[in-house]
Image: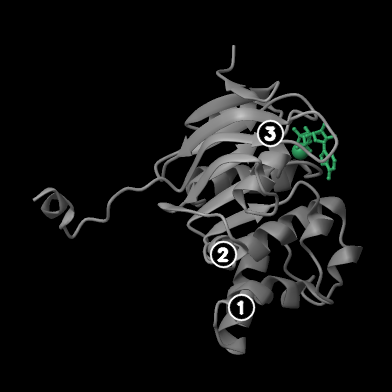
Amino acid sequence: MAEDLHKTDEPIDVPIVRITDLDFGYKGQSPVFHELSLTFKSNEKIGITGPNGSGKSTLFLVIMGFLEPEKGKVELFGAERRTENEFAEVRSDLGIVFQNSDDQLFSTSLLEDVAFGPINQGRSLKEAEAIARSEIDRFGLKGMENRTPQTLSEGEKRRAALAGVMAMSPKALLLDEPFTGLDEPSSMMLAEFLKTQAPPFILIDHNREHLESFCTRTLVLSNGKFTEPK
Ligand SMILES: Nc1ncnc2c1ncn2[C@@H]1O[C@H](COP(=O)(O)OP(=O)(O)OP(=O)(O)O)[C@@H](O)[C@H]1O
Ligand SMILES: [Mg+2]
């Protein structure tokens, strides 16, 4: 009888990310988190702030399955993820923009870099190129298609990384200080994107104004725990 309650055409609104009681520390160092929990639902835009070194970027790496927690549970899109295969299955649905863009730009041209994701998702070369050109355009990088990503400026790299992630049509985004290095017009472009076009996201940012304008709630990570901002 109980199962019948779930037999409906409406999708059940499972959280995008749910972490429960996570403990993590880098080898030989003091713990970064202790019993950290967070639920990120599909109607949310969560801001995370906190002091340098408090573990914000580390948290994203644990959520993506790039670092393994010592204890606790990571659930993505309704299923617990432990093995590399279990994480890999949903990586293109949860797009991450790393704090350091050099960690995610590796092809010989910007066009190839942005087209890489859609090709991996099984799109034809032609489709992938069209998607890549449209994302490159959306993030103000038109004309730079043939540039080597490593030669782009810091702000251009950041936008290239975002274009590459959005080319995969992710269901949600993890954005690690995406405003760093952006000039005023690029910041305004990113702000507009976050307000009107972005899927649900978790945004790491040190700027209170950004967090207040773009997020539905903000958490402070400090001493391995989340607290509400003062
Ligand atoms: N690969 C690593 N090996 C060892 N320790 C690390 C590693 N990466 C980060 N740390 C340490 O783990 C802690 C958390 O780092 P993390 O980069 O997650 O902080 P953060 O909150 O993102 O800081 P920031 O605001 O400066 O970006 C810091 O003390 C950092 O020195
Ligand atoms: Mg960081």
Residue 35 or 38: which is nearer the viewer?
35
User: Residue at coordinates 46% horizontally, 37% vertically from top-left?
Assistant: 39
Q: Is residue 177 visible?
A: no
Q: Earlier in the sequence, mark 2 or mark 3?
A: 2
Dot 1, how many residues are within 10 Å of its Cα: few (below 14), some (14-19), or many (20+)? few
Q: Quadrant of residue 79?
A: bottom left
Using residue 53 as the reference point, say whether residue 77 is left or right of it: left
Label 1 belongs to which residue?
120
User: Tag 3's secondary structure?
Assistant: loop
Circle 2 SS class: loop
Q: Quadrant of ligand 2?
A: top right
Q: Which residue is mark 2?
A: 92
Residue 5 seen in the current view: yes
Tell me which residue sits at (72%, 33%) in the image.
Answer: 55
| Mark 3 lies on residue | 205
Q: Amino acid at mark 1?
A: Asn
Q: Position of residue 198 (x, y in %)?
A: 52, 51
Closest to the camera, between mark 2 and mark 3, is 2
> Label 3 vs label 1: CA separation?
30 Å
Secondary element under disc 1, as helix, strand or loop, is helix
Number of numbered markers: 3
Image quadrant occupied by the C terminus: top right
Left or right: 75, with 154 as reference point: left
